Amino acid sequence: MQVLQKKPQDIKRPSLSSQDSYRGRFAPSPSGLLHFGSLIAALASFLDAKATIDANGNQGKWLVRIEDIDPPREKVGASTAILTTLEAFGLHWDEDVLYQSQQTARYKHTLNELKRQQLSYYCQCTRNEIKKLGGIYQGHCRTQKNSKEESATRLINQYGLYQFNDIFQGHICCDKKLAEEDFIIHRKDKLFAYQLAVVHDDIYQNISHVIRGCDLLEPTARQLTLYATLNKKAPQYGHIPLAVTKPGFKLSKQNKATAIDNNNPQPALISALLFLGQNPDRYLVHEKVPDIINWAIKHWDREKVAKVKEINIELN
Ligand SMILES: [Zn+2]
């Protein structure tokens, strides 16, 4: 069967209004080496940035952020290994890499600011207690005078935003009850919650487009609420299908079968392009990495990315 290939000039380019520029990012956590699932997310976010040209004729910028705020989950040396892999795969980032572990003073400032504006409160409820009440937090501690010690901090959720338009998936409607929950922004174990850190950094780095896997669809609702609370404009979100080994089972960093080979990036790059629906030419697998990447930028077509949340892949 012959696959019809659109000519690059026929691909609808992502459009930007005249003053806007595209700033995308890839934000891995250093809990292990990059695997095929994370390569797909890295490649999609890179290509979407580089294929978007602003009014001044510049390609989008693509940044890398290491989400290393959860020390117990980190693997020694993983950050460096991730960066080495990105380079081997021709995914070169603009600007300095941002490490979340170095941003805690800024997170703290925002946390204090939310507290000062009475937009957060201390919660001492346990996971079990919440589970007994149906699994959705009902705001029990909003009116309690809990001390800071032994407490998590929850955001007073004034917006409960739960719908948005996704670049790839179209109209998304998240779980409304979950989206309306007062969610945790600072954990009992003194670590900053993912939602606070990620929104904070996307604002700080002026990110305009967040391209990532569908495993982060639901958290997007909370992030939109956090943007509204902080009175900031949210980026555009695009969620690509998740690579799964069977329904509901995403590739994990523990899964050795999915490790990608820095010394032979071509086959994995081609597989990733196929996964993203981009129909790479067969001869490309014999080309140099920069040539594959250039082909992929030129032919990147958002419309070819499957509008599904998961795609099954065969493990070798
Ligand atoms: Zn509570």
Image (spheres, helix red, strand yellow):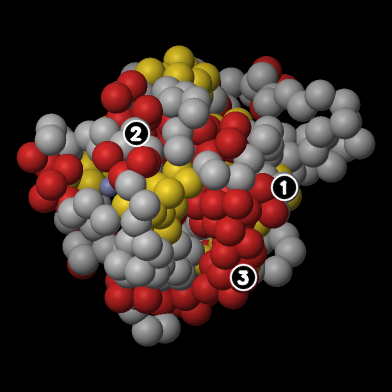
Is the CB atom of the residue marked by disc 2 within 8 angstroms of ligand 1's nearest atom? no
**Is 24 above or below relative to 53?**
below
At 72% from the left edge and 47% from the top edge, which residue is drawn? 206
Local secondary structure at mark 3: helix
**Nearest the camera: 68 or 63?**
68
Q: Please tell me how crowded label 1 is: few (under 14), some (14-19), or many (20+) other residues with Cα within 10 Å.
A: some
Q: Is mark 1 within 8 Å of ligand 1?
A: no
Numbered label attached to residue 133:
none
Q: Which residue is mark 1?
A: 206
Q: Which residue is mark 2?
A: 181
Left-right relation of 262 to 47: left
Q: Going by the image, does 254 lie left or right of 154?
A: left
Q: Which residue is mark 3?
A: 105
Closer to the camera in the image, 88 or 67? 67
Mark 2: give few (<14), some (14-19) or many (20+) Cα within 10 Å. Answer: many
Residue in the picture at 58% in, 58% down: 112
Mark 2 belongs to which amino acid? Answer: Glu
Quarter holding the N terminus is top left
Earlier residue among tags 3 and 2: 3
Q: Nearer the viewer, residue 287 or 21?
A: 21
Instruction: Please tell me whether mark 2 sits on a helix, a strand or a loop.
Output: loop
First of labels 1, 3 by sequence position: 3
Residue 59: % across, % down: 77, 43
